[in-house]
Image: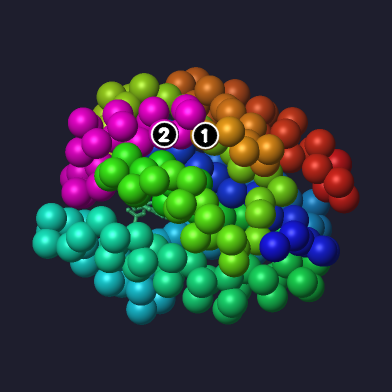
Amino acid sequence: MANTKGLLIVFEGTDGTGKSTQLKLLAQLLEEKGVDVISSFEPTNGAYGKKIRALYSNRENTSREDELELFLADRKEHVETLIAPALASGKVVLLDRYYLSTIAYQGAAGLDPALILQKNDFAPVPDLALLFHAPIQTGVTRITENRGDKLNDFEKEEYLRKVKVQFEEMDLPCIKRIDANRSIEEIHQDVLRLVKNLPGIG
Ligand code: ADP
Ligand code: TYD
């Protein structure tokens, strides 16, 4: 599905690479410039998103196929209720995770990345996918020490290393890679440079 009016910018990468931090900084700046921005995230807070969060502490009790179906159902609802209407009305939509995460995380769990992409054909293609890269250890330290969170079942280091490989192997036209192992300000400047290249924003 192609976007006709608005812009879809997604923030992707392994946990703790700074996606949420950078999304907020970009949203703030665009809002100050008077751009009509809407920020959201996946998994959502909807019914399927809640089922997904329930898996964080007991992921082993669900098959990988059922897990994928939950992420897809959550995204379908998200597209129908928020993403597609916002794009149709010309908004800039910023998403903290989208289908690149499904390719990487469910791909790392053993499902076929090409099939996962195909199953996402209902979802609008991002105009820009900012793919944040940093060593897994850096992300894990940021989550546990800076953010004070515990690691959930999707954030085990060994698994995240496989997820990182999936992100590295991904080759989609919308992807721009960002070295996230730098200061928040340096990364923000990179994000701005890439966003300014989009039509209708610079
Ligand atoms: P993600 O959304 O990718 O999981 P967050 O944006 O939540 O990551 O960042 C995780 C933690 O690391 C937060 O406490 C945040 O303040 C901190 N953080 C974010 N970016 C950086 C950075 N470039 N350098 C150091 N710490 C960072
Ligand atoms: P995260 O962005 O960390 O959300 P929260 O703030 O609720 O912890 O995402 C939760 C986890 O879900 C993260 O480790 C990645 C995983 N995930 C998938 O496995 N597949 C997907 O399609 C998405 C969107 C996320």
Query: What's the residue at 79%, 38% (across, down)?
Result: 196
Which label is found at residue 89?
A: none
SS class of the residue under badge 1?
loop
Residue 64 as seen in the image, left or right of residue 35: left
Amino acid type at image mark 1: Met
Q: Amino acid at mark 2?
A: Gln
Q: Which residue is mark 1?
A: 170
Please check the rendered image and state whether residue 157 is part of the magenta-colored stretch, yes or no: yes
Residue plotted at (36% across, 78% down): 47
The residue under the point 39% across, 46% down is 112
Magenta stretch in the rendered image: 148-169
| SS at badge 2 | helix
Q: Left or right: 126 with respect to 62?
A: right
Residues under labels 1 and 2: Cα distance? 6 Å
Q: How many marks?
A: 2
Disc 1: residue Cβ within 8 A of ligand 2's nearest atom:
no
What color scheme is it?
A: rainbow
Image quarter (top left, top right, bottom left or bottom right) of the N terminus: bottom right
Q: Residue 172 or 41: which is nearer the viewer? A: 172
Please tell me which residue lies in front, 164 or 24. Answer: 164
Seen from the viewer's position, the closer of residues 59 and 95 is 59
Tell whether circle 2 marks a residue whose Cβ is less than 8 angstroms from ligand 2. no
* Residue 184 place in picture, x, y as percent: 52, 30
Between residue 67 and residue 28, name the one nearer to us: 67
Instruction: Please check the rendered image and state whether residue 198 is part of the magenta-colored stretch, yes or no.
Output: no
Task: Answer with the quarter of the image where residue 86 lies.
Answer: bottom right
Q: Residues within 10 Å of mark 2 (few under 14, many from 20)?
A: many
